[in-house]
Amino acid sequence: MTTSETGRILASSHKCPAYKAGFTLLEIILVIALIALASSVLIANFTTFLKFEDRLNPEEVLYAAIRSARFHAACERELTSLSYEKESGSLVINTGDSFPLNNNFSSEERGEIRFYLVPSAQGMERFSDPEDTKFEVREIFFAPDRSSNPFVAVIDNGQGIIIHLTFDPFSNLARQPE
């Protein structure tokens, strides 16, 4: 035992038999509560991630597949094709890359994507309507210079919503309807 400047008697911590190292019950409960909270957040996020496939936007998937096909054609300096496979419900590049669509495009559902070639337009003139040309193709081809024939992708989600996207020869972006 030692005496402090104020005259109080201080017990030395290493000599006191009542002092023990460890955690209090409150600290243990607090740590368990924090672990339970973190686990519930992780489980909630994981289940949301598992359901993400149901919310995939077919337009965004199509844009990604076109970008990938154009990029592969330019990098490998070879003709590359993009097609829609009804059996797998996905867009497929001839390299083997696959871009799965949401559940509306599975083999049991009615969703599908069709491609139509359209005649070239001059300048920024409007492309002709694919329904007028009726020149449907199974695959769209991209040349090593990243170009393609002008085409229209018709996305039918199987629930009555049909979207027409017109792509010009050198862009990954769809032209806006007029």
Image (cartoon, rainbow, N blue to C red):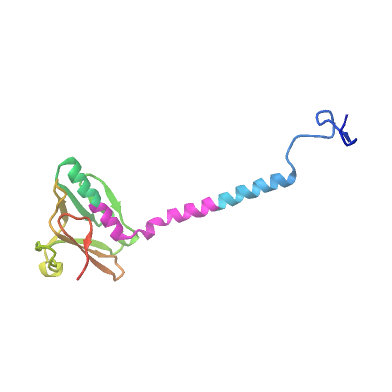
44 to the left or right of 170: right
16 to the left or right of 86: right
Q: Eyeballing the image, is 127 above or below 148?
A: below
Question: Could you tell me residue 159's position as x and y percent?
Answer: 31, 69
Query: What secondary structure predominates along the stretch shown in magenta?
Result: helix
Q: Which residue extends farthest front? A: 5
Q: Eyeballing the image, is 123 above or below 70?
A: below
For the record, the magenta segment spans: 41-66
Question: Could you tell me residue 32's position as x and y percent?
Answer: 65, 47
Asked if one can make out residue 87 in the rendered structure from this viewpoint, the answer is no
The count of marks equals 0
**Residue nearest the viewer, comparing 35 with 147:** 147
Q: Which of the 4 image quadrants contains residue 155?
A: bottom left
**Residue nearest the viewer, comparing 57 with 172:** 172
99 to the left or right of 81: right
Q: Which of the 4 image quadrants contains residue 96?
A: top left
Which residue lies at the image location 18% right of the left edge and 40% below the top edge?
Answer: 76
Asked if one can make out residue 128 in the rendered structure from this viewpoint, the answer is yes
Can residue 50 be found in the magenta stretch? yes
Which residue lies at the image location 57% right of the left edge and 49% below the top edge?
Answer: 38
**Residue nearest the viewer, comparing 59 with 91:** 59
Which residue lies at the image location 86% right of the left edge and 32% below the top edge?
Answer: 11
Question: Could you tell me residue 136's position as x and y percent?
Answer: 14, 62
Quadrant, the N terminus? top right
Quadrant, the C terminus? bottom left
Can residue 51 be found in the magenta stretch? yes
33 to the left or right of 64: right
Question: Could you tell me residue 101's position as x and y percent?
Answer: 31, 57
